[in-house]
Structures are given as C-alpha cells and as structure tokens.
Image (cartoon, rainbow, N blue to C red):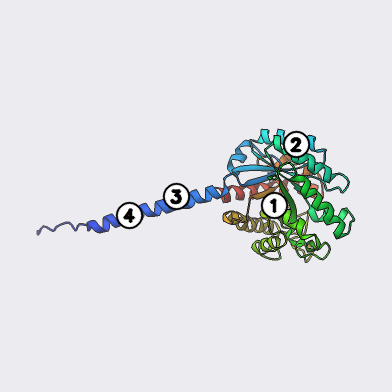
Amino acid sequence: MQNRKKKSVPRLRTISSVIIATACGALLLIVTTAMGTQISNRVITWGGNTPDWNRTLHLGGLRLGCSDPPASCVNYAQQLAKSQGVGEIFLAILLDANKTPAYAREFSQLSLTHPFLQEVGFDDFASQCQRQKLGFSELSGMLNEVARNLKSANPNLRLGITLYEDELSSSRFPLRNLDEDFRKTVDYVHLYPHYRKEAQKFSASMQQAKELFSSAKIIPGIYAYDRRDYLPCAAANSTPCSNLEELSLFEQSLKERVALLGDQSVGWIEFYPGSFGLEAHWDKWSEPRFCRPERVQECIENTKKMHEAVRQSLNP
C-alpha cells in the first residue's frame, strides 16, 4: 500500500486562528470590564438590602425619606449608610414653605461634617409643590431660596427632585411655569414611570427632562416590586397588568435603563424599594393598596423574580 503524507495545516492559518481567538477573548474582557465599570457604585436603592445583595447590586448609595429636623435626619442617614456599607446618601425631605428654607441652610452646614450626604431633595416633587397652594411666582421664589440656602455652606451639596414621566408634559402642574433660574439649580432628576406600559421610550422622557432642567443629571428610576394592585398597566384604562405583562414590561424597562449608564447625562440607576433579599419583610405588603391580602405571596414571588432579573442584568 502506498504511503501518504499527513496533510499539514499551514502555519499562517494556525497563527491567524490564535490571533483571532486571543482578540475575541480580549474584546469580551473589555466589554465585560466596561459594563462592570459603568455599573459599579452607580446603583441606588430606597432603603437597605442584605449584604450579599449589596455586593450583587454593586450598591453605591441609598435614598431615604425623612420628615424630622435636619440633625435627626442626618443622624439617621449616617446609621443607615454605616449599616449598609455605602458612602452616598440621597435624602428626600418634605417641602414646607414655612420650614424648608431654614432647614436647607442647616443641611448645608451639616453636610460639611457629614460628607456622605450627596443630595437633599424632594420626592413626588410636583405633588409636594401643588400642596403648597402657591402661585407659580411665589412658589418659584420659595424654591429659589431653598436652592440658595442648600448650597450656602457647601456648593457641592446636590439638589434633587423626583418626577414621573407623565408629569413632564402634564397640564395639571406645568413644570415649565417654574422659574427658569430655579430649574437650572436642580442637580439630579430622579425620573420614574407611573405605569408599566410607558407612553414613550424612556430616552424620549429623559430628553424632555433635560430640556426642563438643563443642568441636571438624570437618575433613571424603576419599581422593582409587583405593582399590579397599585396602578393599572397603562394610563389609558383601569386594567391591571397580567402576571406576564408585569414581569416582561419590568425586564424591558430594566434593560433600557441599565444600558443608559454609559450616557454622560445619567448619574445613577435607582430601585424602589430596596429590600433585595428581604422581599417577604417589606412593610408595604401589609397595605392593601400595594398588594391585596389574598395576593401577598404572589406579590412576593413576582418581586423575587424581578430581583433575579436585576441580578442577571447587572452581572452579565
């Protein structure tokens, strides 16, 4: 039988294959590292979580509400920051024309000795403004005083507000009627959806917010809990989301917001509530408005599924 030479692989092709494989591996490492860099320490939760979840979330800050005088709020914030191992606190306070201007000055002073205080601001900003029952001129004057006082001792202390996407063009409280000087002092807009089915892409809402508050960075917010009993699925009707819609629409919104962390106009991403790893212990489950008593276990399970989606999205 005739001997046949074994066919050899050209050396050039072998080297090329090695180069391509190495390049692909390097590209994957770069993409993964870039994603990690985008996410690391740029996640905020309303309230605390378990230590394991704080690591999974790459948690960088906490947001919390406080209606006490400034010294008490700052002490509370310090305890929570220490227990959760974070270095940034975003504090939401009540808007009160009689108290807030003076409180703002006190917060400014306190922030000099409590550098974890990143922001003092207003949750449900439009609703709080409406409750003041002031004309836009008088309201703007009070808000300008708050903004000046908040930065009087510490110009680096941030002013933040929470807005909902449907409020950006609402005629009930036209945000554009607020004084432009005040709108330029807002450093962060925490931008949340009211409904799972959003009327437009979040990027379009972000652009609207930037036009109204030109100096602000946007903090995309997302509700990481079952809201089927809290609000209808869309603004146009009273029908709640199905289980499938609740989960799939959440994941869709989550992906859109996480992708925006590479945008220079985006500061952080925010989840309400916290309670990652503590889903069954969230105190709002006892309120039927948040979850009907017969659905509590289902609400908890759906919330756990959302949290798992967050884990996968933040740790690709």
Q: CA distance from mark 4 to mark 3?
A: 15 Å
Which residue corresponds to the image point at 64% horizontal and 47% vertical from the top-left? 307
Which of discs 3 and 2 lies nearer the camera? The answer is 2
Q: CA distance from mark 3 to mark 2?
A: 41 Å
Q: CA distance from mark 1 to mark 2?
A: 20 Å
Mark 2, Cα crowd under 10 Å, few <14 / some 14-19 / many 20+, is many
Which residue corresponds to the image point at 49% horizontal and 48% vertical from the top-left? 33
- For mark 4, what is the residue? 19
Which is nearer the N-term, disc 4 or disc 3? 4
Percent of width and height locating residue 203 = 64, 62
- For mark 3, what is the residue? 29
- For mark 1, what is the residue? 188
Horizontal side of 309 relative to 157 (left or right) equals left
**Which three-letter amino acid code belongs to the residue tagged 1?**
Tyr
Q: CA distance from mark 4 to mark 1?
A: 45 Å
Vertical arrangement, residue 265 with respect to residue 103, above or below: below
